[in-house]
Amino acid sequence: MNWQIKPFSHRCCLSGNAFEDGARYVSYLVVDGKSGELTRFDLSREDEERFEPPGEVLCRWSRVYKKEPEQENTAKLQKESAESIFISLFESEDEDDREERETMKQVLGVFLERKRVLRDRGFSNEGSLQVMEHRKSGNVFLVPTGRMTPDSLLRIQEKLGEWIG
């Protein structure tokens, strides 16, 4: 006997209609009379009377359908947010908080390299700048090195936490 049971289908197996949020549905677990395999059937409460199980019913249960909230891919959003912040750091070079901006460039550069958004192309200017290439666009960024201190990392972590989440 095969014990792999299909997951909840979100649709009535008889009518094919999607379950409505807040509506009751019924599920059956049936041992197929011919193959001996377990099969799950999900159906609307209204269609239950028409359902004829193709074998022995092992169990039946009923629940209220709750639509799953749409989940955003948070890892992807974080990567895209980090990428846009990184690029914006190079677009406007204010002198305010220059040290913090340089540290943020380095931290985000390392993060985006690990996420395979940026590619390390070596060092220039006697090792004070890391050359990083954006994989999709081919743009090259000169990322400062050696600017991370424990204090600056704590400040950057808090700021990035606010921006990226």
Image (cartoon, rainbow, N blue to C red):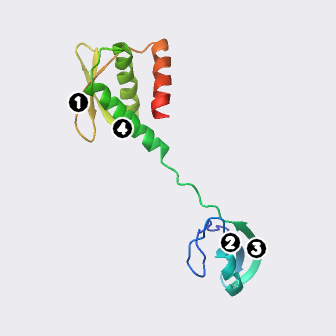
- Which circle, 1 or 2, is nearer the viewer? 2
Marking on residue 72: none
| Image location of residue 63, percent across then percent down | 72, 66
Sooner in the amino-acid sequence: mark 2 or mark 4: 2
143 lies above or below 119: above
68 lies above or below 113: below
Query: Label 3 sits on what residue type?
Result: Arg
Q: Which residue is mark 1?
A: 140
- Which circle, 1 or 4, is nearer the viewer? 1
Question: Are the residues tagged 1 and 2 within 8 Å (C-beta)?
Answer: no
Q: At 29% from the left edge and 18% from the top edge, which residue is drawn? A: 94
Distance (Cα) linking label 1 and label 2: 56 Å
Distance (Cα) linking label 1 and label 4: 14 Å
Q: At 65% from the left edge and 76% from the top edge, which residue is drawn? A: 43
Query: Label 1 sits on what residue type?
Result: Val
Distance (Cα) linking label 2 and label 4: 44 Å
| Image location of residue 144, percent across then percent down | 31, 18
Circle 4 Cα neighbour tier, 10 Å, few/some/many (<14 / 14–19 / ≥20): few
- Which circle, 3 or 4, is nearer the viewer? 3
Question: Are the residues tagged 3 and 1 within 8 Å (C-beta)?
Answer: no
Q: Which residue is mark 4?
A: 116
| Image location of residue 61, percent across then percent down | 75, 70
Relative depth, front residue between 91 and 157: 91
- Could you tell whether 21 is left or right of 78 in the image? right
Sooner in the amino-acid sequence: mark 1 or mark 4: 4
Q: Which residue is mark 2?
A: 25
